[in-house]
Image (spheres, grey):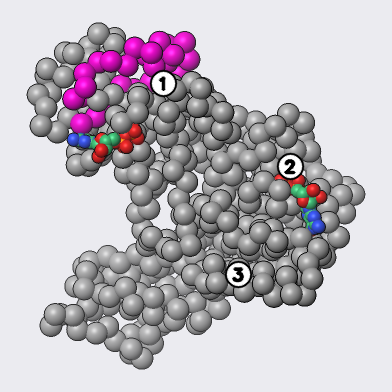
Amino acid sequence: MLPLVALVGRPNVGKSTLFNAFTRTRDALVHDQPGVTRDRNYGVCRLNEDHPFLVVDTGGIAGEEEGLAGATARQARAAAAEADLILFVVDAREGPMDDEILSWLRKLARPTLLLINKIDGMNEDTVRSEFARYGFGEMLTVSAAHRQGLDDLLDEVVERLPEEGTTETLDTDPNRIRIAFVGRPNVGKSTLVNRLLGEERMIASEVPGTTRDSIAVDMERDGREYRLIDTAGLRRKARVEEVVEKFSVIKTLQAIEQCQVAVLMLDASEGVTDQDASVLGAVLDAGRALVVAINKWDGLTDYQREQAEALVSRKLGFVPWAEVVRISAKHGSGLRELFRCIHAAHASATHEFSTSEVNKALEVAYETNPPPAIRGHVSKLRYVHPGGSNPPTFIVHGTRLKDLPESYKRYLENFFRKRFKLVGTPVQFIFREGV
Ligand code: GDP
Ligand code: GDP
């Protein structure tokens, strides 16, 4: 499970600026893709590669009690209550005027770090002595807007997070594919999961829970083994009260983190909504293999099917590598194809490349189409080595790589995809200057 960090503070202290700084994607897997929307409250910080953590911006959590009706706000409040670390953000310019939140935090009694933001242009000693009365042993000062002090902040945060990290429920059995069925409420996740588990009568030993009651279930289908990672569907079956909180962003993010293949479920009659796009963005950020399942295909006329096809292919045009299957969770149709895609995606995502085969590929790609000169400079690609799987990662070494155009990077990606027949998974290229 990813540890959870909650940003708590009055409006305007800089929480969302911090949130954005934390959750900005570092590498080029997603960039700012049209078609990907970002959840403004929930994200994963991957700035420290070895210690990713969940970030929740609880904007508006105190202050406006009345406005807490929305499920998102309720979730944010609950998130703060079970956060591994709370960043209590205050404003250096405004001075200490956060007493309401302070007393709420005292009652909550979670590990809390006082973070004084907007320190730019302020006298640090003065500010510190002002906030001393809050009684925190330690205070951190940053300027989120100017990205000052964020490296130190990141170190402090990581140091305070629980050790167990992400590997706890990671299952290294190569024969068992970890799948998460993800999507917004009502697309049919639990119908599908229940059907899958029901079909195979001999269900499902629950995998012993980790912290914060995560649930995974193992199942077998056509002689293959799978682990279904904590999805709404599983939970609904296991715990009735989960129905109340139908869609938990945090659990979705956790499930994505722990799976190898994410099956993004869509409702055929509703196309691709913003919420779908936000779940998709989380899958891509995490670098997980992806299969898109358009559910409720049974209920549609031919005309509606055409419409749905067109809409989905337009909205998902930017992930051309993802396979799309049409299913009916209700009637159980399309499931064989769904599992074929899951296997293909898993095989691509976890393939182990040899250094020689990837170098051969780079050589051929380079000779077929060398990088163009940019302002008189030509990038040289010297060699490449495999840098990991799920997603397949290739580390390219060379010179003047800063001048390598995006279009050439896409060419390389497509070349590798084609040559190694990679489907259903993002592919990551990392460019390193020098030898
Ligand atoms: P939130 O309401 O707590 O999420 O606060 P925002 O992140 O929206 O920031 C509120 C305002 O403070 C915005 O105008 C930001 O540009 C500004 N701001 C955020 N961080 C800093 C900072 O480090 N220094 C300065 N001077 N302004 C900041
Ligand atoms: P979840 O919130 O994503 O877990 O969605 P549910 O599994 O609870 O399904 C929401 C609603 O859609 C329920 O009323 C289901 O009966 C219905 N539903 C699920 N799958 C299908 C399907 O394949 N076809 C049709 N027509 N309805 C479905």
Earlier in the chain: of badge 1 and badge 2, it is: 1
> Circle 3 sits in a helix, a strand or a loop, which is it?
helix
What's the mark number on residue 234? 2
- Image: 46 above or below 124: below
Tell me the quarter of the picture where residue 209 sits. Answer: top right
Q: Position of residue 162 (x, y in %)?
A: 46, 29
- Image: 195 above or below 22: below
Which contiguous range is marked in magenta? 92-118
Decide if residue 120 is on the left or right side of residue 343.
Answer: left
Instruction: Please name the amino acid that badge 3 sits on.
Output: Leu
Instruction: Give how far apart the Cα atoms at labels 3 and 2 are.
Output: 29 Å
Q: Position of residue 279 (x, y in %)?
A: 55, 52
What's the mark number on residue 63? 1
Instruction: Give how far apart the Cα atoms at labels 1 and 2 are.
Output: 36 Å
Quick one: label 1, few (<14), some, or many (20+) residues within 10 Å?
some
Instruction: Please name the amino acid that badge 2 sits on.
Output: Leu
